[in-house]
Image (spheres, helix red, strand yellow):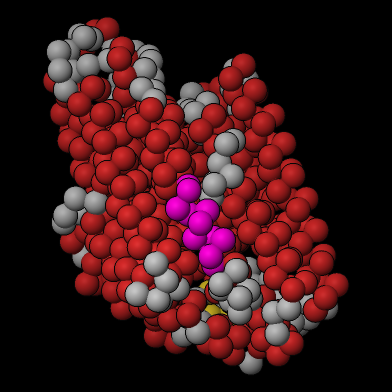
Amino acid sequence: MMNNLIILPLLIPLGAGLMTAIFRKNILFQRIISILAVLLTCAASFFLISQVSSQGIQTLQLGGWPAPYGITFALDMFAALLILTASFVSLACLLFAIPSIGQERERYYFYPLYQFLMVGVNGSFLTGDLFNLFVCFEVMLLASYVLLSLGGTKPQLRESIKYILINTISSSLFLIAIAYLYRITGTVNMAHLSVLIAQAGQDGLITTVSLLFIIVFSLKAGLLLFFWLPGSYSTPPAAVRAVFGALLTKVGIYAIFRVFSLIFYHQPETTHLILGVMALLTMLLGGMGAMAYWDIHKILSYNVIISVGFIIAGFTAFSMEAIIGAIYYLMHDMIVKALLFLIGGAMIGITGTSKLKEMSGLIRYHPLLGWMFFIGAMALGGIPPLSGFIGKLIITQGILEKGALDPFFYALAAAGLLSSLMALYSVVKIFTNGFWGETLLSKDMEKISTKGLIFPCVLLTAISIFLGLGGEVLYPYLAAAAETLLNPQIYIEAVLK
C-alpha cells in the first residue's frame, strides 16, 4: 500500500540536520530542534507501526516511478520495529549529550551530524534497493567519521584513521558486489532481485557474489571481522559511544537479515553455514575479550561483539522461533547497550578514568546509577525476567530444534550459552569493582556532576524492563516481522504489485 508518510523517519532528521547546520552558532536553538526532531520521529514510528500492523507492508515509489525502475522505500514490521527502537536510543543519547558533550563540540556541528547519522540509520531500514542501502550506509558513515574525530584528541584521530580506512574498504567492496549483481541480473531492487534469482536459481556465480556481501556486512556489523571495533568505540564522548554501540553495528545486522532472507536464501548450506560459523567464533572471541580487560571502554565494546554473534546465530537457524528471538534480542540489545554505555560514560566522567582498578564504591553517592547498571547487566546476562532472558531463551530453543537436523547447531547453542556467561561475568566485574567496595572519591573530588545524566538512563532502563515484562504484548508484532523475513513473497508482492 502506497503511503507517503513512511519517509518521515528520514525527512524529520534530515530537516533538523539542515536547520541546526544553518543556525550552528545558536546552541539553544540547536538543542530544541534536535529534541523536537527525535520526539517527532518517535511519534511517527508509533504511527507507522500501527499502519503496518493494520494494513500490511507500506511502500513509497518516489516520483511515481514503479518498482523496479524507480526508487523504492518499503516498510515492513521488521524495519518499523527497528526504527522505533533506534528513535528511543537516539532520544536518550541526545538528552545525555546535551549536558555532557561540551559547548565546543556543540558549536562544531555536533547536532547536524547527529541528525544526519539518524538519516543514514533510518534510511537503511527503509530503502528497498541495494544502491540506496549503500547510499544510506555512506551518509551514516560520513556522519560517524566526523563524530568520532570531533574533539581532535590524539586517540580519536588515531582510531578515526583506522575506522575510516576499514569502512572505505568495505564500502568499495559493497559497491563492487552491487555492480556484479547488477551486471548479472540488471536490477538493484531487492524484491526484483529476489524474483529473478528465484527464477534463474542461485548458481555458483550468484553464491560467490553473496559471499562478497557477507564480507561487506560482516565488516560493518563486527561479525568476526571486528578488529577495528574496540578501539574505535572507545575514543569518542559517552553519548556518541552509546549511539555507535547501540545502532551502527545493528544496521549491518539488519542488512544481513534483509539480504540473506530476501535475496540469497537458496543455498543456506553455504551462506547461512558460513554466517553460523562466523557467529560462533564471534561469540567466543568477543567473550574472551570482554573477560580479559579491566577497562570499561573495552569491556563494553567486546560485549557489542558478543551480541552481534548471538543475534546472527539466531538468524542462521532460520526458523520462525529463532527469527522471532533474534529480532526481539536485537531490539533489547540496542536499548541495553545504549544504557550500559551511557552509565559507563558517567562512571568515567565522575572518576576521570576508565580503569576499573582505579575506581570503587561509586554506589554510595550514585545509588540510582549503580542499580540501573545492575539491571542492565542482568538483562545483558539473560537473568529472568529481564529482556535478555526471553531473547536468549527463544533463540536457544530455535537453535536447538535445528540441532536435530544438523549437530553444528548444538555447538552454536553451547557457544551462545558460554558467551552469555562471559558477558555476565564481564559486566558484573564493572558493577562490583566500580560501584561496590570502599568509596575512593568524596563528593567534592568527583570530576563531573551527574545532573542531567540520570533521566536518559532512567528512560532506557524503563524501556528495558518493559521489554522484559511486556513480551506478550510485543509477540504479535515480532511474529509479523519474522513472517515477512521467512516468506519473501509477502515483501515482493508489496513492492512489485
Along the line of sight, the residue nearer the viewer: 144 or 271? 271
Magenta-colored span: 272-282
Q: Position of residue 124 (x, y in %)?
A: 60, 61
Tell me what residue is drawn at x 62 percent, y 27 percent: 159
Q: Position of residue 208 (x, y in %)?
A: 73, 66
Residue 280 included in the magenta stretch of the image:
yes
Along the line of sight, the residue nearer the viewer: 185 or 352? 185
Q: Quadrant of residue 25?
A: top right
Give the main secondary structure, helix, strand or loop, of the magenta stretch: helix
**In the image, is residue 337 above or below residue 266?**
above
Q: Residue furthest front?
A: 407
Residue 404: tell me if it is visible.
yes
191 to the left or right of 479: right
Tell me what residue is drawn at x 54 percent, y 60 percent: 275
Q: Position of residue 41 (x, y in %)?
A: 47, 59
Q: Quadrant of the C terminus?
A: bottom right
Residue 332: tell me if it is visible.
no
Q: Position of residue 314 (x, y in %)?
A: 41, 64
Tell me what residue is drawn at x 53 percent, y 65 percent: 273
**In the image, is residue 392 above or below residue 230?**
below
Q: Quadrant of residue 295?
A: top left
Q: Quadrant of the N terminus?
A: bottom right
199 to the left or right of 478: right
- Total number of numbered labels? 0
Along the line of sight, the residue nearer the viewer: 494 or 398? 398
Q: Residue furthest right?
A: 183
Along the line of sight, the residue nearer the viewer: 355 or 42? 355
Tell me what residue is drawn at x 34 percent, y 59 percent: 413
Residue 145 included in the magenta stretch of the image:
no
